[in-house]
Amino acid sequence: MTAKTGTGIDTGIHTDVDATVDYANTRDSLEDQFFENLFGPTKVMLILRGLAPDDAVRRAEDAWDHGVRAVEVTVAERSHLDALEAVVAAARGRSATVGAGSIYRVAQVPIVAELGAAFTVAPGLSADVSRACREIALPHMPGVGTASEITAAEALGHTWLKAFPSRELGTAWFQAMRGPFPWPKWITTGGMDLDNSPAFLAAGARVIGMGTRIDDWSRAGHLLGD
């Protein structure tokens, strides 16, 4: 369509935006509710990256024992699929939920779904990956780092967004983005630890994603809903 000024003058600028659409209603309510239920009162997701299957299971079980509800196993390389499969198998006996991370190619989606991943997380935003996940009703959380990416994520129906790399973006980035974008539910990943997590929660993060930096769960009460 062609944009016009308030006086009805044709600007000559062509845009695909339909002013009659309520974009808030394009958000995926089922996906939103999935993540709401997944995290519940907790504010942490354990991220297992590049670990051998036995080590990944051990760390996941330790997290579950301390009340963590969400575990992500990254599968940036095909060799990481064994760890995902092992953690998914361990989760079945606990009714726990395991997702697959580093999902940035469409070809990865059916593979991790077949292995039992309950959700996917990406370091960036891909419309093709979002659509592939939606086609099989697999909740997906894309990664963003700019206002343009946040806008595109909303158009794809996402409400839960991963800010990456969060430490480099900084708490001021979250505070700045909350003005024009009050709706995202943020998870922070990249450089997160028990010491800097309170500042990111105060800046607007809903969930903190971290891996081996969680070395003492007794210090993580502020992330576990205690």
Image (cartoon, rainbow, N blue to C red):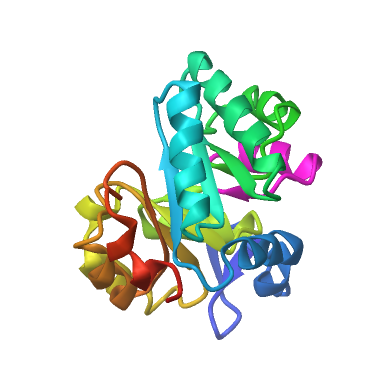
Q: Position of residue 115 (x, y in %)?
A: 70, 27
Q: Please identify the residue farthest to the bottom as the structure is shown.
A: 7
Magenta segment: does it hold 127? Answer: yes
Q: Is residue 121 left or right of residue 51?
A: right
Q: Position of residue 106 (x, y in %)?
A: 64, 28
Q: Quadrant of the N terminus?
A: bottom right
Name which quarter of the figure residue 90 lies in.
top right
Magenta region: 126-141
Which of 120 and 195 lies nearest the eye of the viewer? 195
Q: Position of residue 64 (x, y in %)?
A: 52, 52
Residue in view at x 73 percent, y 67 percent? 29
Q: Please identify the residue farthest to the right as the structure is shown.
A: 136
Q: Quadrant of the C terminus?
A: bottom left
Q: Is residue 66 left or right of residue 36?
A: left
Which of 42 and 57 lies nearest the eye of the viewer? 57
Q: Is residue 16 left or right of residue 221?
A: right
> As displayed, is residue 111 above or below residue 6?
above
Magenta segment: does it hold 74? Answer: no
Q: Position of residue 109 (x, y in %)?
A: 67, 30
Residue in view at x 37 percent, y 79 percent? 179
Which of 71 and 190 lies nearest the eye of the viewer? 71
> As displayed, is residue 177 above or below residue 56?
below
> As displayed, is residue 26 above or below residue 111?
below
Query: Does the rendering let one see residue 123?
Result: no
Residue in view at x 50 percent, y 26 percent? 75
Query: Does the rendering let one see residue 184?
Result: yes
User: Number of labelled discs?
Assistant: 0
Which of 118 and 61 lies nearest the eye of the viewer? 61
